[in-house]
Image: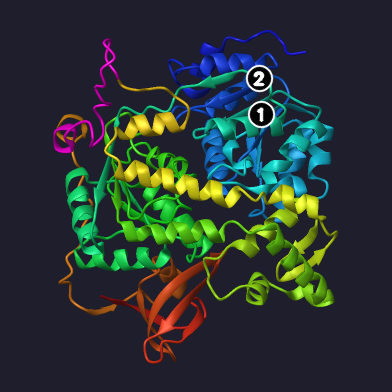
Amino acid sequence: MPGPDPDLDAALRRLYGFSAFRGPQREICSHFLRGGSALVLMATGDGKSLCYQLPSFVGEGLTVVVSPLIALMDDQVAALRHRELPATCVHSMLERSERDARLAAVERGDVKLLFCTPERFRVTGFLDRIRARGVARLAIDEAHCLSQWGHDFRPDYLRLGEVRRALGDPPCLALTATATPQVQRDIRATLGLDDAPLFHTGVDRDNLFLSVHEAPDDQDKLERLSAVLERTGGPAIVYCALIKDLRWLEGELQRRGLQPMVYHGDLSAHERRTQQARFQASRDALMLATNAFGMGVDKADIRAIVHWQLPRTLEAYYQEVGRAGRDGDGAFCELLYREEDLVIQRNFAEWANPTAAFARELIDHMEQLGDRLHAADVDTLRDALLHKNRHDGRVDTVLRLLRSAGCTTGEPGHDLALARVPDDDELADWLPDDKRQNDLMGLLRMVRYATEMHCRKATIHSHFGFDDDFVDDDGDEVGCGACDVCTDAAKWQDAHLPQTVPVPRVDRRAAVGAAPEGDDPADATATVERGDWLDVQGLGLCHVVRVHRRGRTVKADVERLSDLQQRTVDLRRRKWQKVRE
């Protein structure tokens, strides 16, 4: 039985230094502490994490938080440990010895808040160990990921209902910023929250200005982006759908004297962590990123978010623009709409939706490989079923579903094996026939948002089930006052944007020449980054494609200028010298 409700206001001041709760935070914390479950819909930046953090530190027992992103949980744990609060996380990026040490601390009762990814529950022994410790509360962050109809479906989230039951049905908070009524129903059904109350703050962010610029070509986009950055300054994020477009844009902005950071899947893990950390600490940075960037970024002062291409869904779009203006000051969010970009997202919708027949074809092929399956990687399996296209994710999707359902063991390229073969009913359940059509309808709603001259915020609010029609007492539509349909963008910027911090520029006329790095290469490796030019002994002039750091080992994938061939160079074992542009 839960104990008496503690003084939450005093705990908030003592543990976090905050003077008051925001919105329904106090009510949610109190409800959770008293043993109640709930569905929590709070706009990005409204403080969802406090709703499970505070109860875990003032209540008895262990709270387990399931989060989809390792970087996010690392950041949260670091912040909590800085406050000397007993929190930890367990995930695949840690060495096994470190994972065991952290779980041992949980078992001893030294930890009150444990973060993990949903995939961790597939690891043998993990569920048993925390079940033996006893779980007082369970929180599911980014809960929209458990719905196939959401914008970021992750198969391992589907098992969290079973996990909750295995843990003895502890009180459960399901939290998300973006969930349509259909996704809310899925969350409730999967987690057993049918009668749990709904707490929500709506989706309105009145300090965000939403705008759409229709562009005839990429040069027009570039001019418009430059104008936006000139007015808003930084920090700013530009989202690109394709890595090749991101690279082109990076080059164009560099030619204009800008120094953008970049974040995408072709970077090494070290480079992604470094770029995220630099952006987090910067007052003026410009980040070019694919949609992989942002979920783990808790940065309050982002002044502009620009979408270089149309996102696939309104949910994804609103989650991404919601990362701006968390400090409460104004922020400008613009979508650069070009009709030709529809092909990109249309293809993504096709590639993200394998049919049950496609899944059966892949499974049959895996069975036919026999023992050879152990060494088969994702590219090998793709080549057997698909025309070469790096964006076609149907094989990846089926492999994730098989892994989540316990049908496979090992990993592609590392002892992959079929543990059991799903039947046709299972495949039909995993891959409903109408999923592709639903995704295409989501894209159509995104197009309508961009092309119909109707209040942008009213369109979004309606999509999420809120009847914010922005009407006056007489029922006349007055508009939101914070989108390009309802008001003049320049006037809004003058009234609401804080003083501009210019995005940094560099003098491109700097002399070309060698940049001495000192005699000890161990001291110089810290300065090497993607995009640098190195004069490498035995190779000559080389362009750095990516940098890998693990412990004291520092290696660079470089492209040799003389033959454009890629090689990997151990920077601590080979002589080299950086060359300035």
Q: Which mark is residue 188?
A: 1
* Circle 2 Cα neighbour tier, 10 Å, few/some/many (<14 / 14–19 / ≥20): some
Q: Check if residue 365 falls in the magenta segment.
A: no
Quadrant holding the C terminus: bottom left
Q: Is residue 298 left or right of residue 130?
A: left
Task: Between residue 538 and residue 572, name the one nearer to us.
Answer: 538
Q: Residues within 10 Å of mark 1 (few under 14, many from 20)?
A: some
Q: Is residue 243 above or below residue 155?
A: below
Type of amino acid at the residue the image marks with label 2: Ala
Q: What is the span of residues highlighted in magenta in the rendered image?
A: 471-492
User: For the residue marked with disc 1, what is the amino acid?
Assistant: Arg
Whether residue 84 can be seen here: no
Q: Residue at x 43, y 47 (%)?
A: 444
Residue under the point 21% across and 79% down:
512
Q: Depth check: give the residue in front, 103 or 176.
A: 176
Answer left or right for 250 relative to 275: left
Q: Quadrant of residue 170?
A: top right
**Lower sequence index among marks 2 and 1:** 1
Q: Position of residue 70 (x, y in %)?
A: 58, 48
Prevailing secondary structure class for the magenta stretch in the rendered image: loop
Relative depth, front residue between 135 and 121: 121
Q: Tell whether label 1 touches label 2 (CB within 8 Å).
A: yes
Q: Quadrant of the N terminus?
A: top right
Q: CA distance from mark 2 to mark 1?
A: 8 Å
The label number, if any, that marks residue 303 in the structure image: none
Residue 280: percent from left, percent from top = 39, 46
Asked if 370 appears above or below 479 in the picture, the reply is below
Q: Position of residue 8 (x, y in %)?
A: 56, 13
Could you say which disc has been placed on residue 196 in the image?
2
Kindly tell me whether residue 151 is visible in this rendering: yes
**Residue found at x 45% / y 45%:** 313
**Mark 1: which secondary structure?**
helix
